[in-house]
Image (cartoon, grey):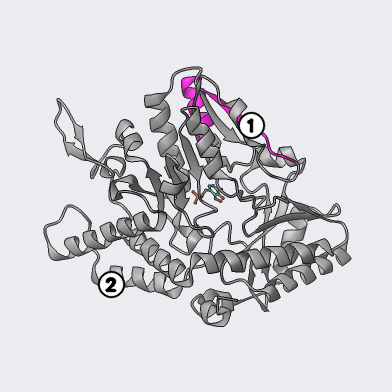
Amino acid sequence: MMIDLTTLRADFPILSREVYGRPLVYLDNAATTQKPLCVLDAMRDEYLNVNANVHRGVHFLSQQATDLHEAARERVRTFINARKTEEVVFTRGTTEAINLVASTFCASQMREGDEVVVTDMEHHSNIVPWQLQAQQRGIIVRHLPITDRGELCPLDEVERMLGDRTRLLCVTHVSNVLGTVNPVKDIIRVAHEHGVPVLVDAAQSAPHLRLDVQAMDCDFLAFSGHKMYGPTGIGVLYGKEAWLDRLPPYQGGGEMIDKVSWERTTFERLPFKFEAGTPDYVATHGLATAIDYLERVGLDNVAAHEKDLTDYCTERLREVEGLRIYGEAGHKAGVVSFLVGDIHHLDMGTLLDRLGIAVRTGHHCAQPLMARLGVTGTVRASFAMYNTREEVDLLVAGIRRVVTMF
Ligand SMILES: Cc1ncc(COP(=O)(O)O)c(C=O)c1O
């Protein structure tokens, strides 16, 4: 084991709290991760010692806050290996990043009857923004099927879906329900052969897998800080400069303009064109600190540890009679969804909670996927770098206990 879990868990004080008089077992990391002390300290320190609005001030504090904010952008750039900081747009999260692309891409690059292709395993935030555009502009949203194991359909099927009117393909890197890691590099290659750009939803991959947007060759990529040990309210849209240049601004206001007059308003250069209003400059510093932390632990170590937990959890869950696992792809990240017998997911989640075990239940913001799986919801355990095999054992013991109650 490359991760020293005792030392690492001490960085997350919340993990030692109790709920209902029992030690907390936090297995809801796909919803949000806990934050290490260094992130909290960095943000507190900024509010205590540096706080001032960024970009507009000539005074010392404003310049220092601006330096931290722009250093965070550079930190994100190196984290995802973007070519330029101009390609890193700060947003409130994945959802806002995808809405930004949906709104500006559809307005400038699509006409009625043009198509966006998504997949059957998308989170609502990679479905509904496109549906809103479909309602407003008459574009068509098509969706790629998945197999019974929870893998995306084969590449030749992807290829067949890409027609003359396909303008964009949007795919999640990792499914938040099934844990499936999609072969995004291959999908992007095939899409590009057909002249179709690709948006990757990296909300569930950024905390677990090394991202390299140049190697992947994606055109857009979105992720959220809070799912990768950073603060809430901050996320990233990466876009290739050539694409971002072609898109119109998303929201209007301060920060995003060059000159404003009643006759004519011009816009800032990238990436500021897409960042209207005061940014959450404390959160960007927090995000950069979280990235430093993640890289100090080492993404390869994190991935190996979470694979061990996922494999161990899957193996232990298979021992529970009547338990069905949803998502059995060959390549999975740290998510395990399941149901036991006819026990409702909400009942299972509520009773596990009383045992101190935090899991997520319900449709996980993926109702079309639930329909495909033929269920209304599942119970989902999702892992982070600080989880342990002992916690998996507690989960399995908890499930067994719940089963005996029915
Ligand atoms: C795959 C996926 N995409 C997008 C999102 C939305 O992220 P956020 O709510 O941080 O914008 C989530 C959140 O669960 C997710 O799992």
Per the image, the residue denoted by label 2 is: 48
Residue 159, given in percent of the width and then of the height, sits at 59, 29
Q: Is residue 254 left or right of residue 114?
A: left
Instruction: Look at the numbered disc 1 and give the secondary structure of its residue.
Output: helix
Q: In the image shown, does 227 or 19 lie closer to the viewer? A: 227
Q: Specify whether tag 1 is near ligand 1 (CB below 8 Å).
A: no
Q: For the view shown, which residue lies furthest in the left direction?
A: 58
Q: Is residue 345 magenta?
A: no
Residue 263, given in percent of the width and then of the height, sits at 14, 25
Q: How many marks?
A: 2
Please, what is the three-letter code of the amino acid marked with disc 1? Asp
Residue 10, given in percent of the width and then of the height, sits at 52, 80
Placement of 358 over or under 327, stated as above or below: below
Q: For the view shown, which residue lies furthest in the top direction?
A: 112
Question: Within 10 angstroms of label 1, few (less than 14), some, or many (20 or more) residues?
Answer: few
Residue shown at 62% from the left, 35% from the top? 155
**Residue 326 seen in the figure:** yes
First of labels 1, 2 by sequence position: 2
Q: In the image shown, does 346 or 25 lie closer to the viewer? A: 25
Residue 179, given in percent of the width and then of the height, sits at 64, 53
Per the image, the residue denoted by label 1 is: 156
Instruction: Look at the numbered disc 2 and give the secondary structure of its residue.
Output: helix
Q: Quadrant of the C terminus?
A: bottom right
Query: Which mark is drawn over residue 282?
Result: none
Placement of 112 over or under 240, stated as above or below: above
Residue shown at 72% from the left, 38% from the top? 371
Please, what is the three-letter code of the amino acid marked with disc 2? Leu
Q: Quadrant of the N terminus?
A: bottom right
Task: Name the image quarter holding residue 402.
Answer: bottom right
Range of residues picked out in magenta: 129-147
